[in-house]
Amino acid sequence: MTMVQDRLALTLSFIALVVLTLFTEDVSSFSDGSKLAKGFSATRSVFCHRSTNKRQPLHFNSRCNGYCEPNRRGELYYDMDISASTYWLDLITINITANEDSDRAVTGFSIYAVDESNMVAGSFVEDENNIIVGSCGDILAYNQETHGAFHKMADHTRRNITLKFQPDGFNHGQINFIVWIVNNHSDIHFLESQPLTPSKN
């Protein structure tokens, strides 16, 4: 995606979010992750039409004087532990935890596994209580990507989340996990893992 296309997609995403906020009272904060993962195509377009590494939450709040830019130093408040340094077919566990001395919560989140070209690699595993996974396949006709895992419901008391990542057995080169963590509507943090390498060629 070119820079011009990316800017256009972000602009359209802002417009779509404003329209959704005005006309759908419970969509503005996406406390229900199913709206992002499996909701109306207009809602999911807010995320699917942006580069994977730019699919941060689009929150607007007076505390931010408008758009709430994610804090790019999320490691000051959160830890992300990965159970492996390589990938192929075995499940990988990802633990995201608020630091002990932090007053932050893992109220909401979105996470992706991306390769060096910012394309999605592999998929995540849903669970009944906390995690829902969505696909951009019907939004991006040229790409059947799984577009990540989200909180099933926002929870202001949640201090950690454990996710399972399923590699697809292909060599994607180095991959990283990128995650946006929502503490509250105006306090959003970004984390990126160390790269994982394929265990086979």
Image (tube, grey):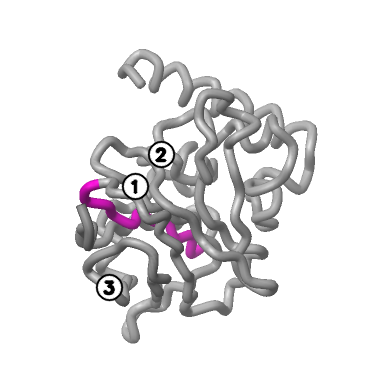
Dot 3: within a 10 Å radius of its alpha carbon, few (fewer than 14), some, or many (20 or more) residues?
Answer: few
Q: Which range of residues does the magenta coloring cover? A: 173-183
Are dots 1 and 2 in contact, CB under 8 Å?
yes
Q: Quadrant of the N terminus?
A: top left
Judge by depth and name the residue closer to the eye, 24 or 134. Answer: 134
- In percent of width and height, residue 167 lies at 40, 59
- In percent of width and height, residue 54 lies at 39, 38
Q: Residue at x 67, y 74 (%)?
A: 129
Q: Residue at x 76, y 48 (%)?
A: 26
Q: Residue at x 25, y 68 (%)?
A: 76
- Give the farthest residue toward the front: 201
Task: Name the mark nearer the viewer: 1 or 2.
Answer: 1
Please tell me in which quadrant of the rendered image residue 93 appears. Answer: bottom left
Residue 146 visible (yes or no): yes
Badge 1 marks a residue whose secondary structure is strand
Dot 1: within a 10 Å radius of its alpha carbon, few (fewer than 14), some, or many (20 or more) residues?
Answer: many
Checking the image for residue 84, the label placed there is: 3
Q: CA distance from mark 1 to mark 2?
A: 8 Å
Q: CA distance from mark 1 to mark 3?
A: 16 Å
- Taking the image as shown, residue 151 lies to the left or right of residue 75, namely right
Q: Tell which circle, 3 or 2, labels the residue nearer the N-terminal end.
A: 2
Three-letter residue code for mark 2: Thr
Q: Which residue is mark 1?
A: 114
